[in-house]
Image (tube, helix red, strand yellow):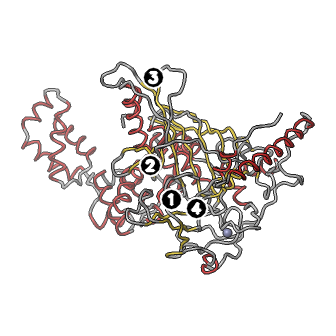
Amino acid sequence: MGDAATTAGPVAGTDTAYETVIGLECHVELSTRTKMFCGCRNEFGAPPNTNVCPVCLGHPGTLPVPNERAIESIVRIGLAFDCEIAPHSLFHRKNYFYPDMPKNFQISQYDLPICVGGHLDVEVDGEGRRIGITRVHMEEDTGKTTHAGATGRIAGADYALEDYNRAGVPLVEIVSEPDLRSPAEARAYLTELRATLLALGVSDVRMEEGSLRCDANISVRPVGHPEFGTKVEIKNMNSIRSVERALRHEQERQVGVLAGGGRVVQETRHFDETTGTTTSMRSKEEAFDYRYFPEPDLSPLEPDPAWVERLRAELPELPAARRRRFEQRYAVPPAQAATLAADHAWAAFFEEAAAGADPRLVANWMTGDLAGLLNEAGIELAGAKVGPRHLTALARLLADGTISSAGAKAALAEAFATGEAIEAVVRARGLAQVSDEGALTAVVDEVIAENPGPVEQFRGGKEGALNALIGPVMKKTGGSANPQVVRDLLRARLSR
Amino acid sequence: MTPTIDVDHVARLARLVLTDEERERFGRQLALILEHADRVREVAAADVPPTSHPIPRANVLRADEPGPSLSHEDALANAPEAEAGMFRVPPITEREEEG
Ligand SMILES: [Zn+2]
């Protein structure tokens, strides 16, 4: 999408080329049955304040107890990113006053997180990049605040309403190193991160529902400059696409400031989805003092190394490995392999369909027409009326020449709408292409007679003139002629 | 050595408004506490790891099984104000934390 050009190209009016440096902080809500420190249900969309108890409402005298499934999930996430699982880690209290946290502190991890020092391999424009992961730590989510009043925004609100259903939901924070060098890389990282978490089955990672949230730190510096520029934090991006848009806007804004001789101010900026721009969130910036201290009510985490190794051995195939396997075993092109491997449902569908037909054809039609039909209908693959057997049949009929590309397109669209078998659709709609030479000879002769110009050119040695004859034959047969047979037939008739 | 402490800063972090008398008294008390911590530091040998918990236990966890929550009415019973099933709180003028 031309991202590289906006990253390193010289800016109008200057000769300086700038490099962008991006780090991402992602928060992931785990899909456990219960909250992190109490037995309240962890569910999205319940009526306000129905999944709350004295622990998550911060009543005095209550004691938190960590959810073992959440701990298992974060260890699996750490292992998937090749992190070291700390033999000893602690929960800390992060103290702050905000009504979305009724305790006036959030239980988080501070200097001893459970997972440290991993990485995620991403691919951008066919080039592999290894992005460092600083840490992955466990914390709890906050409640949900609704700003009420005339404007509906924070500024000018008359009061706020708090729903604590989300307070205490297990939340995993994944912090990347400042290794990303363009908005496109940030998108690739997030896509890979999301796919990996999906493969692990630890979260439904829906950005629009907030189960995956992402803040970005971004700075720019002249190419070759050893130190990082002043960084700006961007918030409020609710899709992977928004993250990329916000970063692209902010990158250009910062380069503009520097190119104009100005200074970038360290601040937090808010992304506005409608305008595609970022605006400063606060006038005064003070460093927050959260007065972290070890949570006295929670014991340290000291995972048994044998248990960690068992979890490592039981990790599912992750998207990166799956992608490589699709490329090597099925000879699927990298971009298609990435699309198919990113989602478990797509990968399973593909492998089932590819077992009975040419995998490259299956991949091509899944990532092309089928993806387009799903997109148009606004449904997920799991909800589609066509299954792997439809794609197998489609690829087989294409491979043996029974249907043309145009016929396959029509057959898939009809099967997608009705769920009928491809073979039945091809029969009922007469989509099989005519490969019978006898049936086509008359049409071919007709076209030769009607097009003396191209005929002469072809006979004069101009190979390309043949296409000017194939077109009319296809037209006369209503697209049902097998183009390869037509080509051979034309050649044979013209060389006589 | 008596450590100095910015009582006003600490009070602001805790959202407390102190009288002059309280500021003076708490300043003195906080200094004593820090002095005590410093004495502990003097005797703490390099081979003694920092103690976060007095009882050597780890991995106290619970199964991911739902337990009882409060009824919606009980949950809101102590709310100074409620509206639409939610706790109604004063307006938030400045976003202070992001979780
Ligand atoms: Zn609870």
Chain identity of mark 3: A
Does mark 2's beta carbon lie closer than 8 Å to ligand 1?
no
Gap between marks 1 and 2 measured at Cα: 52 Å
Gap between marks 3 and 1 measured at Cα: 40 Å
* Quadrant location of the C terminus of chain A in the rendered image: top left
For label 3, the crowd category at 10 Å Cα-Cα, with few meaning under 14, some 14 to 19 and many 20 or more, is some
Both on one chain, marks 1 and 2?
no
Residue type pointed to by label 1: Ile
Q: Nearer the viewer, mark 2 or mark 4?
A: 4
> Mark 1 highlights which residue?
B92
Depth check, front residue: A306 or A464: A306
Both on one chain, marks 4 and 1?
no
Q: Nearer the viewer, mark 1 or mark 2?
A: 1
Gap between marks 4 and 1 measured at Cα: 9 Å
Q: Is residue A393 above or below residue A10?
A: below
Residue A341 x, y percent position in the rendering: 52, 48
Q: Earlier in the sequence, mark 2 or mark 4?
A: 4
Does mark 3's beta carbon lie closer than 8 Å to ligand 1?
no
Which residue of the protein is positioned furthest toward the front in this rendering? B21
> Mark 2 highlights which residue?
A363
> Mark 4 highlights which residue?
A99
The secondary element bearing badge 4 is classed as loop
Residue type pointed to by label 4: Pro
Depth check, front residue: B54 or A422: B54
* Quadrant location of the N terminus of chain A in the rendered image: top left
